[in-house]
Image (cartoon, rainbow, N blue to C red):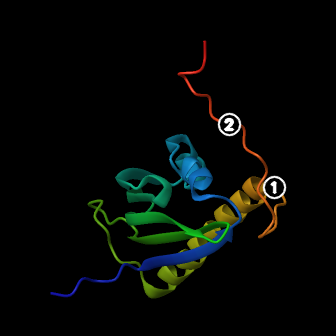
Amino acid sequence: MLARMPSIDVVDETFLTVPPDVLAAEFAQPHNWRRLWPDLQLEVVTDRGVEGMRWTVTGALVGSMEVWLEPVLDGTVLHYFLRADPPGPDGAPAPAPPRRAAAESRRRQRAAKSIALAYKLRLEAGRAPGEPPPARAPAANPARVR
């Protein structure tokens, strides 16, 4: 039996001149999820640390979502995937009519790019590819603190 493709299928990629761990820390904070996806409830399926997160999605859509953080050169490619359908009367995924699915996919594509570009603007802080990153404060070593 072939699996049916969800009616909303969003894929986005954006390069950020930011190390993966910095970006991973942003997505690891559950309080950020409500701000980024206000109409979705997320439950972690896989926390892959610096490689990203996978969630199940409920709320306005039912399905799955993933953020994959791929180290590339001096930054990270932020890969975003959303595969979902609107909920039916019983809460289970129900395929949207083609025009509604296309409109919702476009809306979610714009939202994904908006999220990526907001992180790019804030976290890069003007750093261009190839420029050295700003010096980070060294982490405190508890064994040395007296």
Label 1, residues with CA under 10 Å away: few <14, some 14-19, many ≥20: few
Residue at the disc numbered 1: 125
Q: In this rendering, would 89 be left or right of 135?
A: left
Q: Which residue is drawn at the image coordinates 30% and 59% (left, top)?
A: 91
SS label for mark 1:
loop
Quadrant (top left/top right/bottom left/bottom right) for the N terminus:
bottom left
Position in image of residue 7 (x %, y %): 41, 80
Position in image of residue 6 (x %, y %): 37, 78
Quadrant assignment, res 142: top right
Q: Which residue is drawn at the image coordinates 59% and 49% (left, top)?
A: 26
Looking at the image, residue 128 lies above or below residue 26: below
Q: Residue furthest right?
A: 126
Q: Amino acid at mark 1?
A: Ala
Q: Residue furthest front?
A: 144
Lower sequence index among marks 2 and 1? 1
Query: Depth-wise, is mark 2 or mark 1 nearer the camera?
Result: 2
Q: Residue furthest top?
A: 146
Q: Amino acid at mark 2?
A: Pro
Q: Which residue is drawn at the image coordinates 28% and 83% (left, top)?
A: 4
Quadrant assignment, res 61: bottom left
Looking at the image, residue 54 lies above or below residue 72: above
Residue at the disc numbered 2: 138
